[in-house]
């Protein structure tokens, strides 16, 4: 494979391939109301920060994508990042664009690899590319509200306890957190309300195929914590915690 990883700013002809990752996430994850502030802008105002990977020998077949965005945050990324996580980054970045300014910190927002290529080492490559991109654009940190890939197997466990799990070699037990650690990232905290997804019970039934007929916590496949169901109110809410990781960089 002759891998090309580039921004859509440098290769706008590849921008249509960003949408060719159907089913990359569980259906309910597509219904965060703030997502529209990123998706639809990745090939325009965020083009420098969004990457696409293709095989040069098959350039119409995307292999992976990686989204990031600049946002304004006055705190120290090693000790003070927003509790709102992904949602906070997206909202702040959108406010910056409306105000005609660029944020001082870059944040990773998504890395997606084609289903048939997962486990082949593309995720670390895309993370390294996001780090280089942030450095080249003059940022001193790339932060990430990380969605640990193994947390869905431990939905009832508080995120802080899950993050504290370690292997004998001292690296995080979670595979995706381990990739970030090996790349030079530092786990700096938990974003307790990183994504908030709310809907009627009919919507949640459609998104998940589950009954949603009992008030209380509902375990949903691929969720990191339980969804709260309120039958009398015809309403269910998912508040996803993520893990803040800071990748200190040296500006170019």
Image: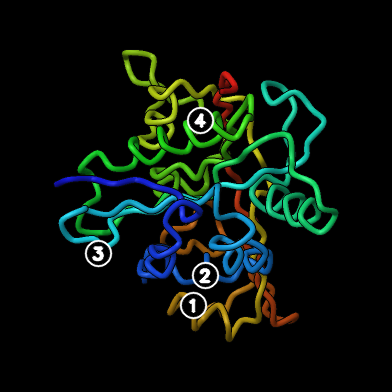
Q: Do the residues labelled 1 and 2 touch (CB within 8 Å)?
A: yes
Determine which residue is flagged by label 2. 28
Q: Residue 61 carries which label?
A: 3
Q: How crowded is mark 2: few (under 14 residues within 10 Å), some or many (20 or more)?
A: many
- Please tell me which residue lies in front, 251 or 223: 251
Q: Nearer the viewer, residue 100 or 122?
A: 100
Residue holding disc 4: 163
Q: Which residue has dot 1 on it?
A: 207
What residue is shown at x 63% (from left), y 29% (from top)? 138
Is residue 37 depicted above or below 113 in this figure? below
The label nearer to you, 2 versus 3, is: 3
Task: Measure the alpha-carbon separation of dots 4 and 3.
Answer: 35 Å
Q: Which residue appears farthest toward the top when viewing the image?
A: 169
Tell me how the rendering is colored.
rainbow
Q: Where is residue 63 in the image (x, y as percent from the top left)?
A: 28, 55
The quadrant the C terminus occupies is top right
Secondary structure beneath disc 1? Answer: helix
Q: Residues within 10 Å of mark 4 (few under 14, many from 20)?
A: some
Horizontal and vertical percent for residue 26?
A: 43, 66
Q: Identify whether 229 is placed above or below 158.
A: below
Q: How far apart are marks 4 and 1 (CA)?
A: 28 Å
């Amino acid at each position: 494979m002759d891998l090309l990883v580039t921004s859509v700013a440098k290769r706008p002809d590849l921008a249509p391939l960003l949408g060719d990752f159907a089913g990359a996430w569980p259906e309910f994850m597509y219904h965060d109301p703030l997502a529209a502030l990123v998706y639809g802008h990745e090939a325009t105002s965020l083009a420098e920060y969004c990457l696409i990977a293709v095989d040069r020998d098959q350039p119409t077949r995307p292999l992976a994508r990686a989204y990031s965005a600049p946002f304004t945050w006055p705190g120290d990324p090693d000790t003070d990042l927003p509790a709102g996580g992904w949602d906070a980054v997206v909202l702040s970045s959108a406010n910056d664009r409306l105000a005609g300014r660029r944020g001082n910190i870059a944040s990773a927002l998504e890395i997606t690899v084609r289903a048939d290529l997962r486990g082949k080492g593309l995720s670390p490559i895309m993370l390294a590319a996001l780090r280089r991109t942030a450095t080249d654009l003059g940022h001193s940190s790339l932060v990430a509200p990380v969605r640990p890939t193994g947390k869905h197997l431990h939905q009832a466990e508080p995120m802080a306890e899950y993050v504290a799990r370690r292997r004998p070699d001292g690296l995080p037990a979670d595979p995706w957190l381990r990739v970030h650690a090996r790349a030079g990232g530092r786990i700096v905290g938990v974003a307790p309300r990183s994504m908030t997804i709310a809907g009627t019970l009919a919507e949640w039934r459609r998104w998940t195929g589950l009954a949603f007929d009992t008030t209380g916590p509902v375990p949903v496949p691929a969720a990191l914590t339980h969804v709260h169901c309120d039958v009398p109110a015809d309403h269910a809410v998912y508040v996803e915690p993520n893990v803040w990781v800071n990748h200190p960089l040296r500006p170019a």
